[in-house]
Image (tube, rainbow, N blue to C red):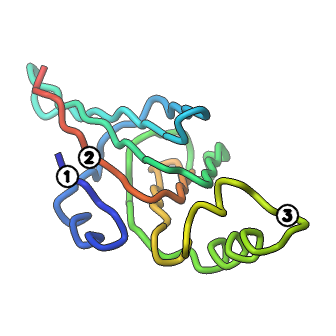
């Protein structure tokens, strides 16, 4: 298991998820979690399975355009500060007109949250703004 948060972003280098397949994205609205089960066939008789578990999610966005044709394999993933969205949320946090109880729980969104970005071989993207992501590797099947 690999845990990544704002302070351990370099751990993303241990997550080699290129060419892993995504078939579903599970949004648990009550627990503020997004779970993405992924799999990779490594040989005729062996398939690896894992989950990307995003905790304390405050934003997610998924496109279904298939700009490059159909496909649900991970082509690229990275992390960034998504400063434009975080600045907007920081403003909402302190504005009585847009007040949000969840955002009020955090001292500084920019110090605690990051954007995890996945691009599929279709060109579609998954963007999740969360406090933590866990790479949970299951046993081989």
What is the C-alpha distance between the residues marked 2 and 3? 34 Å
- The residue wearing badge 1 is 2
Q: Residue 107 versus residue 39: which sits nearer the camera?
A: 107
Residue at the spot 45% in from the left edge and 29% down from the top edge:
23
Residue 122 left/right relative to 53: right
Packing grade of label 1 (10 A; few <14, some 14-19, many >=20) is some
Q: Are marks 1 and 3 in contact (CB under 8 Å)?
A: no
Residue 98 image label: 3
Between discs 2 and 1, the one toward the N terminus: 1
Q: Is residue 87 above or below residue 44?
A: below
N-terminal of the pair, mark 2 or mark 3, is: 3
| SS class, disc 1 | strand
Q: Position of residue 18 (x, y in %)?
A: 28, 53
Q: Secondary structure at mark 3?
A: helix
Mark 3 closeness class: few <14, some 14–19, many ≥20 residues within 10 Å: few
Q: Earlier in the sequence, mark 1 or mark 3?
A: 1
* Residue 84, above or below 137: below
Residue depicted at 86% across the width and 68% down the height = 96
The answer to whether residue 67 is above or below residue 104 is above
Dot 2: within a 10 Å radius of its alpha carbon, few (fewer than 14), some, or many (20 or more) residues? many
In which quadrant is the C terminus drawn?
top left
Residue where numbered disc 2 is placed: 135
Pointer 2 with pointer 1, Cβ within 8 A: yes
- The spot of residue 116 in percent (x, y) is 45, 61
């Amino acid at each position: 298991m690999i845990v990544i948060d704002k302070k351990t972003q370099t751990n993303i280098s241990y997550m080699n998820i290129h060419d892993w397949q995504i078939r579903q994205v599970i949004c648990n609205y009550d627990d503020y979690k997004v779970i993405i089960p992924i799999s990779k066939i490594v040989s005729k008789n062996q398939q690896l399975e894992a989950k990307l578990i995003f905790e304390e999610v405050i934003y997610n966005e998924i496109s279904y355009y298939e700009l490059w044709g159909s496909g649900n394999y991970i082509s690229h993933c990275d992390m960034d500060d998504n400063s434009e969205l975080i600045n907007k949320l920081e403003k909402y946090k302190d504005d009585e007109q847009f007040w949000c109880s969840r955002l009020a729980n955090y001292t500084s969104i920019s110090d605690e949250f990051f954007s995890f970005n996945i691009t599929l071989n279709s060109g579609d993207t998954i963007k999740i703004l969360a406090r933590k992501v866990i790479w949970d590797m299951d046993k081989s099947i």
